[in-house]
Image (spheres, rainbow, N blue to C red):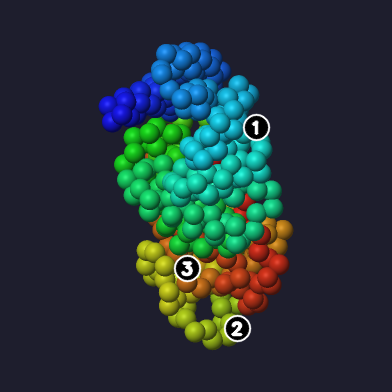
Amino acid sequence: QHYKSITFIEVMEDGQNAIKILARDEAFYFKNNVGATEDQKCDWLSCESERVSKDLDQLTLDPHQLKYLKGCALNVGNKYNLKAEEILIDAAKMNPTMFEIWNELGDCIWKKGDKKGARNCFERALNQERNKVSLRNLSIVMRQQESVTNAEIEESVKISKEAVSLDVTDGTSWYILGNAYLAQFFLCGQASNDLKCSLNAYSKASADEKVLSDPDYHYNKGIVFKYLDDYNNAIAHFTDAISIHPQFSECLSELNDLKDQILKTRQLIKNKGKLKGKNIAVMLRKLKEKSLSQKPTKVSMTTFDKLNAGTNEDKAINCILISSFVPNGRTPFVCICLDTESNCFALNIYNIDCGKAPKLGDVMTVPYPQKSAVNIVIDNELNDFEMLRIDTPLNMMINNRQLPRDTLAPLKLTTTALT
């Protein structure tokens, strides 16, 4: 009896290993087939999935085990497979206590857009056993509901943490936790700490070669760096994503938009908003008059050149808007400014309704400014400048007036695959 049990386990492992190899080849497809298209990948995967599924018939297994493995083989990849769903439903009927079947069935029907059904499957799996696959899949599907609440996003992060705690060496679990924090940043108040937690999780995930081969991983990480105004790292990760998947259109768009933003910002700083000397003098006179009439503040006023890199907790700066733009109609609202010492710099304002944003000639008071430097080569030309950012317009004043709450405009989630 003991010998038969070991033999059964070995046979089951043989089937699982065949599927793992197929899943690995699918994950590394673009890396191993440079220049291949999405259609070519789909054709290859369809043939290989069918081949592995048929090969599994040679194994001596219980019917529900065999159907489970065959369903797994046909379910590899991102496309919905009706045959996989039918086989997995049969397997679940034969053995409803096997949580792995519910996980695979949930993943399968999720691909056809049945999020409610997928969530039910993952919850049924968790009723059998707390396991990392169910937890991280449930975390994702909770974030993808049509009317997700802040409480559900927070629960999603909590569930992702539990998945990591069950196996701290699993790179996929760390990656999904990073995505959960990223979703929380976009949907629950844009706390910069969420971006830092996301980066920390992504760093742990990078130990997994399979995660590193995923273009969405690099894309999502690039988004984090972009919103931290770390353009060097953002461009590096967007470029990595495209090198893995050259037809990644969303990433190509993000990369080109960011490069255009950097080039335009540098040019406007260099040309001082394209203003002539006479107009600059008028702007500076207005700025100094407004600064003199300003009420005392709890922080010390300073100029751009005296700010330190990073967050200046005890300081504020007065500046006047001489030019502005919104990169491709999206965030941030980029301001080109002058301070009282004629320093010209960029100010990125996040989470602001562009229809209520500062206008040309407005004097802005920016408390706790965050200063960073850009030093990056684009098209063989060095783009070297410094800039400020402010995470919420509610902390700043325009023409000595505090901005109302309706100035806020929440960021939109731009990641392609918060898996």
Residue at (71% x, 67% y) in the render: 406
Residue at (34% x, 49% y) in the render: 168
From this viewpoint, is residue 82 visible?
yes
68 lies above or below 291: above
Q: Amino acid at mark 2?
A: Ser
Percent x, y of residue 257: 55, 40
Q: CA distance from mark 2 to mark 3?
A: 21 Å
Q: Residue 283 versus residue 175: which sits nearer the camera? A: 175
Report the mark closest to the observer, 1 or 2.
Answer: 1
Tag 2–tag 3 contact (CB < 8 Å): no
Percent x, y of residue 284: 56, 69
Mark number displayed over residue 230? none
Q: Amino acid at mark 1?
A: Lys
Helix, strand or loop status at disc 1 = loop
Tell me which numbered mark, 1 or 3, is placed earlier along the sequence: 1
Numbered marks: total:
3
> Which quadrant of the rendered structure holds the N terminus?
top left
Residue at (51% x, 15% y) in the render: 50
Q: Residues within 10 Å of mark 3 (few under 14, many from 20)?
A: many
Helix, strand or loop status at disc 3 = loop
Q: Residue 174 versus residue 313: which sits nearer the camera? A: 174
Residue located beneath label 1 in the image = 112
Helix, strand or loop status at disc 2 = loop
Q: Amino acid at mark 3?
A: Pro
Report the mark closest to the observer, 1 or 3.
Answer: 1
Q: Residues within 10 Å of mark 2 (few under 14, many from 20)?
A: few
Mark number displayed over residue 293? 2
Q: Residue 291 versus residue 40: which sits nearer the camera? A: 40
Residue at (62% x, 51% y) in the render: 412
Residue located beneath label 3 in the image = 369
Q: Residue 217 versus residue 361: which sits nearer the camera? A: 217
